[in-house]
Amino acid sequence: MDLQPGLSFSQAPPILVPFRFFLSAPLFGLLAVLLVLWYGPSLLDSRWQPMVLALTHLMTLGFLCMAMIGAMLQMLPVVAGSPVAHPVGVARAVHWLLIPGVLLLAGGFLLGMPLPMRLAMLLLGAGFMIFIASAGLSLWRAPAGNPTMIGMRFAVAGLLVTVVLGLVLASNYGWAWWLTRWVQVTNLHATWGLLGWVGLLVIGVSYQVVPMFQLTPAYPRPMTRWLSWGLFSLLLSGSASFLLSEGKEQVTWVVTLLIVASFAVFSLMTLRLQLQRRRRQSDVTLLFWRFGMACLLLALALSLVGQAMPVWAGAQRVDFMMAFLFIAGFAVSVVNGMLYKIVPFLIWFHLQSLLMGMVRVPNMKLIMPEPGMRRQMQLHFAAVPVLALSALWPPLIYPAALLFGASMIWLELNLLYAFRIYQKYAKLAPKEEPSST
Amino acid sequence: MSQERILDVRGLEPPEPLERVLDAAASLQPGERVRMIHHREPCLLYPLLEKRGFQHIAEAKAEDFHEILIWRKGDAEAAPHGLT
């Protein structure tokens, strides 16, 4: 018998490290909604309009990145066994750089003014570089790789590429120089951001959280071993084909097909594993993930339509529908569903640690009550199809925005409710225990 | 002679495995230890045990079969193989 002493994992970072990001995310979602209500159906005239760019970044940086960065800072010590050095300082710096950075970026797009754009570049560039360096160092130092950690490494590399391309594009606005291949660079930036950073992180994290929280069998080993690696290589090949002068279209087609097939395999496998889960009851997280996977499959199908008929008059509508399904339908759903597992779990864990068994820690279902989560989920599930259909009939953007806004407010209230429970119980901690916040 | 309580938490949703094992550990009598059986390694359990004055030793028998022995610090009778 080969008994090994249990690995001594250091204490998870203080609760405010992830929570400051989690609590900010829905507020950016709400800002995105206000912007949609302000501009209305004209938003859908063209994806290149400044207000569409502002909207996209409020959602991708303000909502998705906030939640994903918070979750990663929390997960790195547990999953990779390698905590981020100085988590409190890193979280504070990244958070306080990203908030004004995102606001200035959106403002810069909307006002068409170079100064906010230059400031946004500085703040976002610094914020992301601090995060990439800290998370990268932690992942670099991590012992023997597990699939989640490898997925996270590729995702952070994807974020680096996205940020660099984003800075190049923003400098175009900030200093009014003319980037000749602006459209192609923008497409590369969006591809790396959505597939490289968001997609690869979701895949990597799924390997850990789907079996853990949804009690499913593990993902098949060949998939956990090769998928992240393969997708990252495909993204690199797709980017390299950008440099080709001839045969570019064929290469792009093959790479797109392989990327779509890889994400489809991931999505179908996740749905299949969920059908094999040990606990038959469905919970909110499971439903959010199923919905997210269905939206991902639809977005993938639409990407092939867009690729096959780029000059078709309806291509613009397909682009919008695909973006709505990918960002709001897939990414927001998955992140939202994850928050409903990790937030009550983290609060429970931190209270266990603080209260040392002297006071009974409330059950997770009391920390984040099911009815509140379910109502918010229903709003989100109503918002996404309406939003997707608004690509075909633009006036639908109003009810879509109202539903999505109500969902964001409800999400924020649910998170705040859970956080207040933490604060209430944390006060009962023995005095000698340093505060976890 | 140490006495062992077997606690099989396979198939339970987080944080139920941790809740159950912390309760079991808190009620350990001198000379007793817990043998926890889990379908994954409960990494987050270890700092909680340490703070409460317990020691543990973990063994992965298969990818989805982990055994963790838990006993009170200083309880030589409960500790396996002479560990305290």
Image: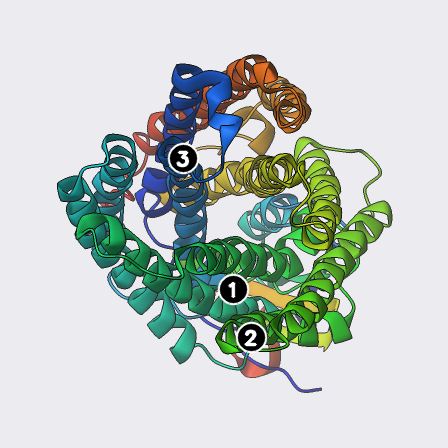
Position of residue A175 in the picture relative to residue A56 (left or right): left
Position of the C terminus of chain A, as image quadrant, is: top left
Secondary structure of residue under mark 2? helix
Residue at 32% across / 36% down in the picture? A429
- Amino acid type at circle 2 is Ser
The numbered mark 1 sits on a residue in which chain? A
Residue at 49% across / 33% down in the picture? A360
Q: Nearer the viewer, residue A130 or B17?
A: A130
In this figure, which residue is indicated by the disc labeled 2?
Answer: A241
Residue A49, numbered circle:
3
Spatial CA distance of label 3 from label 1 is 41 Å
In the rendered structure, which disc, 3 or 1, sits on the residue that comes first in sequence? Answer: 3
Spatial CA distance of label 1 from label 2 is 35 Å
Residue at 59% across / 62% down in the picture? A204
Q: Could you say which quadrant of the image residue A389 lies in?
A: top right
Whether residues under marks 3 and 2 lie with C-beta atoms below 8 angstroms apart, the answer is no
- Amino acid type at circle 1 is Val
- Work out whether A296 lies above or below A282: below
| Image coordinates for residue B11, horizontal then vertical, percent | 77, 51
Position of the N terminus of chain A, as image quadrant, is: bottom right
In the rendered structure, which disc, 1 or 2, sits on the residue that comes first in sequence? Answer: 1
